[in-house]
Amino acid sequence: MKLLEQLIDIASPSGSEYHMRDFLVKYVKDHQSDWKVAPKILYGDELQDNLILVFGDPRTAIFAHMDTIGFTVRYQDQLVPIGGPDAETGYELVGKDAMGFVDCTLRVDDENQLFYDFPRAIATGTTLTWKPTLKLDGEYIEGPYMDNRLGIYNALKVAESLEHGVIVFSSFEEHGGGSVPLLVQYLAQHYPAVRQALISDITWVTEGVRHGEGVAISMRDRNIPRRKFLDRVLDLAAQSGIAYQLEVEGGGSSDGREVHHSPYPIDWLFIGAPEDQVHSPKERVHMKDLIAMISMYKYLMERL
Amino acid sequence: MKLLEQLIDIASPSGSEYHMRDFLVKYVKDHQSDWKVAPKILYGDELQDNLILVFGDPRTAIFAHMDTIGFTVRYQDQLVPIGGPDAETGYELVGKDAMGFVDCTLRVDDENQLFYDFPRAIATGTTLTWKPTLKLDGEYIEGPYMDNRLGIYNALKVAESLEHGVIVFSSFEEHGGGSVPLLVQYLAQHYPAVRQALISDITWVTEGVRHGEGVAISMRDRNIPRRKFLDRVLDLAAQSGIAYQLEVEGGGSSDGREVHHSPYPIDWLFIGAPEDQVHSPKERVHMKDLIAMISMYKYLMERL
Amino acid sequence: MKLLEQLIDIASPSGSEYHMRDFLVKYVKDHQSDWKVAPKILYGDELQDNLILVFGDPRTAIFAHMDTIGFTVRYQDQLVPIGGPDAETGYELVGKDAMGFVDCTLRVDDENQLFYDFPRAIATGTTLTWKPTLKLDGEYIEGPYMDNRLGIYNALKVAESLEHGVIVFSSFEEHGGGSVPLLVQYLAQHYPAVRQALISDITWVTEGVRHGEGVAISMRDRNIPRRKFLDRVLDLAAQSGIAYQLEVEGGGSSDGREVHHSPYPIDWLFIGAPEDQVHSPKERVHMKDLIAMISMYKYLMERL
């Protein structure tokens, strides 16, 4: 879990994903010699802050978003949310401005306005994120940003044995989207055989999706994937012997939304472990579900 | 009206449009020998579940969406809407899961949560649609999915005598969109002379748009078409002698929205007969308005 | 300020931008001989109602939207808004239909429904805009459509000495967007070196952004620009010696939103003078802020 700890220590709220991108580039360069296939590592101005790894002759892409929710300092002691944080008075936030490191406390007033408590003023525009911390009790992993450090973790674990496939590390998923159109177009132009996308992200524990009962395969959320692709993946999942749960939601969204709306014929499906205490600093995922997620991705990436 | 009955009998909620696509491919192949021009029939993986018919040297495309509203079975007896159905307790729904056919009843509770009543559990993820039925009384057509079976019907009637034009059968119009970006890009790349789109869909009876007073030409809805194109179509409509009504709305949307937002210089306009009892199983359209719709499309497709 | 008066006199609500486009084409043709560099003037069907000016070897584009908020006549005396006008009973509106010019009065009822008062019926679909008027008191400019006539004005002033850059005059910014995808794709295909966009538009006076304290540089609104580009611009702004203010908002949007969501790696930032009485017929901007805006654009266009 050292890798997961490292991922959680890096602040990369929407807009500042380059911190995570830089870490991942270094990680891949350091570890690829132990992997079954050394991927092409694609990044740079053409891809903004995103990162693409290409293995063999890919047909399917894994999308894992690098950004997290957080807060932007407005004027005085005001905060504006990045994405949809579960804001509660007393949560600890960290950041950095020209005057140095910041370790402050979140305050929510009666009208749900957000503020920070800190001995000095923090510079306007500074971004703050949940203070890193990770608890493991053998059964659960608990900490900030399970969404989507675990999605990244999953992708890196799958990468170890991946022969054919693309791994896309994307930006701005938590706040307004906007990186996937670029990434999908890049794939369509350079790897037109990639016609399938699996969204490696974390979903919610609900009355139908429970801790410890396997990775969730989302049959729909705010968007509806094509039934033909869904049925194909469900057939494979049933054959896999890996623990999984079916999810059906009317709301919620992911990078899948933008794959869906792109002008390219690429199917998508969200597959991820569930968490509770969503978007709080103590998101919690069952270890079994994470293991099932990794196994399911390995199984599907070989067969799709 | 046998064709309309056939169209209504096919379940194709958003995500499962391939059922309707397959019917239309067969229908076109069976009937094109009677048409003035036999179109190119374009479909397949490159176009996902969509279908394009190309006649002669096209300048204008007709868009008719193949999907309908409906419901997805969630957990236990819960339902999640597909699109925006007009849900009322007692409406009959049909579908199919691994255990066989389903003919159940919709139930809406005090909090507007949706449920089904059926002797057995229906599999999670199963889609349900209004039970097909069609009433004709010489004046009105009444049944589920006038929106957009009549839009498809219109396109197929226009097809009979169409010399130059494209007919696009699209997906996901009722739920989140996402097929038109692909379709418009395909047209722009293969038929760049196509710079105009007419949206063949059904609109609402309102205080300004009434049953039996002709096809509605929408001057705007949530989106505003370019005035120059609008004025050109209105000039032609005035010359046509065909009954039409002007519609101005602040809300509502159609495939036109996505043509508008595409990166290609394609104008669009919504032209369609009005219905009342919108998105219920008893949508109702005046026969005169449907006839005016078909006439207007024929007139415009020749002259635009 | 004669130019600004001319700009305000032209009615170009969303959908009818071609009026402003025609004026600008003529203006550029008449004045370019006095400019440092004569630009390529790009317009026509391929660009719908938009206009692009290309100077030298461009790396950065200025986006200034040509459309304004307004109203569409619905049925009887009803109005539907174009964009988000600040509607108040008594405001004067002007327009034109087949029966001639219209100079009517806005009426807002208790349920916020909109109506016009005029001796005769105005044709359905007619567009109405704030009655032009311009007040200058040496300190403030006040009138309708400071947003975005001042953004256009800024672009034309910058044009006078611009050596390398693109100026894009866009459509539909106030109502639903949809022209920027086309414009960005055009730039990406014809001027791929253009990787930066400055949004020349007007923002709001708030508790953190005040009249007379300089041009506002928006660190974020509903969308979040890439931090790396933001930091680069802020460094330049700090060096410039020009008066500017930092803005941080959770809401609000601009053409930047669509640059952000485009499939091309183009960075964006909103930089504009603030106004109060937003979207009313008496939008008010401090002269100092407009001057700072022009100076900042000139400074940045040379150095970015």
Image: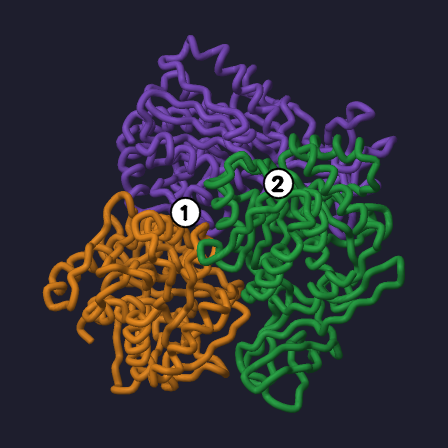
Chain colours: A green, B purple, C orange
Could one spot residue B1 in this view of the protein? Answer: no
Query: Mark 1 packing: few (<14 Cα in 10 Å), some, or many (20+)?
Result: many
User: Is C217 displayed left or right of A36 in the figure?
Assistant: left
Q: Position of residue A158 (x, y in %)?
A: 70, 46
Residue sitting at x 37%, y 49%:
C185
Indicate the amino acid at tag 2.
Gly
Say what secondary structure mark 1 lies in: strand
- B42 or A36, nearer to the observer: A36
Looking at the image, is A91 positioned above or below residue B198? below
Give the residue number, with chain letter if any, for mark 1. B220
Could one spot residue A36 in this view of the protein? Answer: yes
Indicate the amino acid at tag 1.
Arg
Residue lying furthest right:
A138
Q: Position of residue B15 (x, y in %)?
A: 62, 34
Picture quadrant where residue C115 is located: bottom left
Q: Position of residue C244 (x, y in %)?
A: 39, 82
Looking at the image, is C105 positioned above or below residue B92? below
Q: Position of residue A115 (x, y in %)?
A: 65, 80
Say what secondary structure mark 2 lies in: strand
Picture quadrant where residue C136 is located: bottom left
